[in-house]
Amino acid sequence: FAMTARIENDTDLMGMRAAGRAAASVLEMIGEYVQPGVTTEDLDRRCHDFIVKDLGCIPAPLNYGGGGGQMPFPKSICTSVNHVVCHGIPSPSKKLKNGDAINIDITVIKDGYHGDTSKMFFAGEPSVMARRLSKITQECMYKGIEQVRPGARLGDIGYAIQRHAESNHYSVVREFCGHGIAKVFHDDPQVLHYGRPGTGVVLEAGMSFTIEPMINAGKRHIKILPDQWTAVTKDHKLSAQWEHTLMVTTDGYEIFTLRGEEDFG
Ligand code: MF3
Ligand code: CO
Ligand code: CO
């Protein structure tokens, strides 16, 4: 059974910092290649080679899953374009066009520790709507992170995210959540992106997990495509996602996957 992911000692802390930095560096590397005309397969190839050759890490998504008759994930990163909510599979037939919004989700394993992070990119010039959804979704993630400290509850995180999304007339995807992460990719606890304040698991220093809200411009409902992975909005309206890996510290949080461009954390 799954255990709650925990940073137990200095080895764990150094390991998670290194894994988080490595994952963040992939997102920093790939930005300049997100352009009209590039395929999501091209982006996968570049990230795969960087992760393996430059970072000496393992891309965790490659061959992940596959329990219960599901096809294992066939690529090294997730690329989720426009109305794709998450787990988009890179493909040579998916060519980005001007204005496309794409979430690139990177998970690396370094010395047995996982760093998991994603952000939104745009190919060329996005619509005002796409830019706004992406910005509000990033704010949702930050508002969730700001709740993190010992004694706070998981419901406080979910509530902060849901409140910001819904007050902007967006909806929160319920089928996927943040997760405990350290030596195991998807561990307990489940970090819901909606909820009620003062409810759920009480946070303690040392717990490590992701916060990764998926926010829809339209209704919250999703469906899974026949490839068994790709989640899309039922109404085919836009979806956005941002993700960080972090831990609870004695007085707040430490984000392991912070990038240089962020003025947060
Ligand atoms: N990185 C995703 C997450 O945030 C999980 C991807 S699993 C995959 O949890 F198999 F789809 F790659
Ligand atoms: Co994750
Ligand atoms: Co991820």
Image: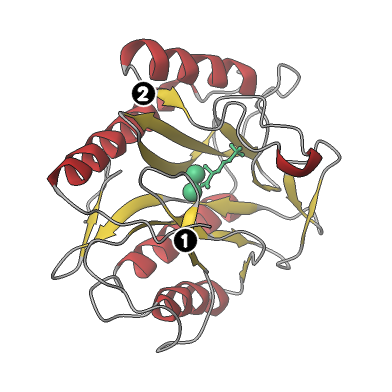
Label 2 crowd (10 A; few <14 / some 14-19 / many >=20): few
Question: Residue shown at 69%/22% (left/top)?
Answer: 95
From this view, report whether residue 21 is shown above or below residue 225. above
Q: Nearer the viewer, residue 159 or 180?
A: 180
Question: Residue shown at 61%/74% (left/top)?
Answer: 169
Label 1 crowd (10 A; few <14 / some 14-19 / many >=20): many
Q: Is residue 116 left or right of residue 168?
A: left
From this view, report whether residue 26 is shown above or below residue 136. above
| SS assignment at label 1 | strand
Question: Residue shown at 58%/34% (left/top)?
Answer: 78
Residue 221 image offset from top left, x and y in percent: 76, 64
How is the protein colored in the picture? secondary structure
Q: Residue furthest bottom?
A: 198
Q: Residue furthest right?
A: 226
Residue 120 image offset from top left, x and y in percent: 49, 43
From this view, report whether residue 37 is shown above or below residue 173. above
Question: Residue shown at 30%/28% (left/top)?
Answer: 111
Task: Compare marks 2 and 1 and give the one earlier in the sequence.
Answer: 2
Amino acid on which the number 2 mark rests in the picture: Met
Q: Is residue 206 left or right of residue 83?
A: left
Amino acid on which the number 1 mark rests in the picture: Asp
| SS assignment at label 2 | helix
Q: Nearer the viewer, mark 2 or mark 1?
A: 1
Residue 204 image offset from top left, x and y in percent: 26, 72
Q: Which labelled disc corresponds to residue 197? A: none
User: Can residue 1 be seen in the rendering of this structure?
Assistant: yes
Residue matched to label 1: 188
Mark 1 and mark 2 in contact (Cβ < 8 Å)? no
Residue matched to label 2: 29
